[in-house]
């Protein structure tokens, strides 16, 4: 039986962000994670989001909306404190909820207006779940024996259960793939430079990031939206990246996708989508992009449910799905431009 040798996973960032196009809206979102109390203490999450209008001629624009929260999470991902500016009603009810799908369902139930109104803070609250899952990876850049240290803190059999639970949770971790193999992947998953998000030619292209000492993790999103009245299209250019601080001051990326898409201006129907895998941990991961074509014909406001229905488990990539789900906010961003016209 012939064996198939897969090419190495993509390892090249698309950063820095492109210069903001004229007459567009850019939403930027980030979660920065740090460990003020040390490796075994609560994690501090600082989430920021901003909507920025760029005029027709390009250059300096104006902030239309922005938000920030600070939350602490225990080792088991339970939210132990949270505050925000501006603070949405019932935000304090998140205390005691664990990051994960339950948190996303809880936000949907308790604060549905964040979703229905496309508020910027929703994305960075929703992203607590994914960020809580992968942010501990930041310590691998500071301790060569990070994996062994992590296992030493686990109960007997816990590591084996976690590895078993990973199988078939996404496209890249299907049974038999390198990411769930006892031998592991053939290459280090953390060898790609994350680059700089901010473009030197466009200093207003991103909001400011918080500073912290020691290990740190960041999930960052960018969504550029423009309206093409002549063709009746919404044009979308988006990017998603997970990265961690290195000891030398740079950053290493472990997940990065870019997305280009178009939607019908009148109906919000998704007409085209072109995902690009830029940085991924395992050789099998890029194959997940092909199933995204199942979303063609979906309406953007319903895209979160469509992603869950069409790209669940090994049918999709967890991180690509997160990038796709954020397209639900595009109609809100396009409406900004209609109001400014």
Image: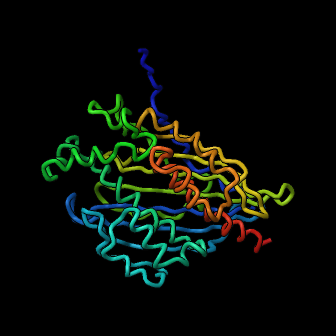
| Picture quadrant of residue 298 | bottom right
Is 77 situated left or right of 22 in this image?
left
In the picture, the quarter occupied by the N terminus is top left
27 or 62: nearer the viewer: 27
- Give the farthest residue toward the top: 1
Image position of 152 with respect to 128: above or below: above
User: Residue, x 65% and y 52% (percent of image)?
Assistant: 237
- Give the farthest residue toward the right: 230
User: Residue, x 48% and y 68% (percent of image)?
Assistant: 48
198 or 262: nearer the viewer: 262
289 or 256: nearer the viewer: 289
Percent x, y of residue 246:
34, 47
User: Residue, x 26% and y 65% (percent of image)?
Assistant: 36
Is 86 situated left or right of 188 in this image?
right
Observer able to see residue 333: yes
Is 16 situated left or right of 100 in this image?
right
Observer able to see residue 326: no
| Picture quadrant of residue 92 | bottom left
Is 312 situated left or right of 143 in this image?
right
Percent x, y of residue 297:
70, 53
- Give the farthest residue toward the bottom: 89
Percent x, y of residue 19:
65, 53
In the picture, the quarter occupied by the C terminus is bottom right
Image position of 197 with respect to 291: above or below: below
């Amino acid at each position: 039986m012939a064996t198939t040798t897969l090419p190495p996973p993509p390892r090249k960032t698309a950063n820095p962000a492109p210069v903001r196009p004229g007459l567009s809206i850019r939403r930027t979102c980030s979660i920065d994670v740090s460990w003020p109390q040390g490796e075994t203490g609560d994690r501090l999450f600082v989430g920021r989001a901003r909507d920025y209008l760029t005029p027709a001629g390009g250059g300096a624009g104006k902030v239309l909306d922005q938000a920030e929260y600070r939350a602490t999470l225990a080792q088991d991902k339970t939210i132990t404190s949270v505050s925000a500016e501006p603070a949405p009603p019932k935000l304090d009810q998140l205390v005691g909820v664990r990051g994960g799908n339950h948190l996303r369902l809880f936000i949907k139930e308790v604060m549905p207006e964040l979703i229905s109104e496309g508020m910027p803070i929703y994305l960075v609250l929703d992203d607590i779940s994914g960020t809580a899952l992968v942010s501990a990876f930041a310590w691998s850049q500071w301790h060569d024996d990070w994996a062994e240290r992590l296992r030493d803190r686990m109960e007997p059999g816990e590591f084996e259960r976690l590895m078993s639970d990973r199988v078939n949770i996404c496209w890249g971790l299907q049974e038999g793939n390198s990411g769930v193999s006892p031998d592991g992947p053939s290459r280090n998953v953390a060898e790609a430079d994350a680059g700089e998000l901010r473009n030197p030619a466009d200093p207003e292209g991103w909001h400011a990031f918080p500073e912290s000492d020691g290990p740190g993790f960041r999930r960052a999103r960018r969504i550029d939206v423009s309206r093409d009245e002549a063709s009746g299209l919404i044009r979308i250019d988006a990017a998603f990246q997970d990265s961690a601080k290195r000891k030398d001051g740079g950053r290493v990326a472990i997940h990065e996708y870019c997305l280009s898409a178009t939607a019908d201006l009148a109906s919000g129907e998704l007409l085209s989508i072109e995902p690009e895998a830029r940085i991924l941990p395992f050789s099998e991961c890029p194959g997940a992009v092909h199933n995204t074509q199942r979303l063609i014909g979906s309406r953007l406001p319903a895209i979160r449910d469509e992603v869950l229905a069409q790209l669940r488990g090994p049918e999709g990539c967890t991180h690509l799905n997160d990038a796709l789900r954020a397209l639900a906010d595009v109609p809100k961003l396009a409406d900004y431009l209609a109001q400014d016209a």
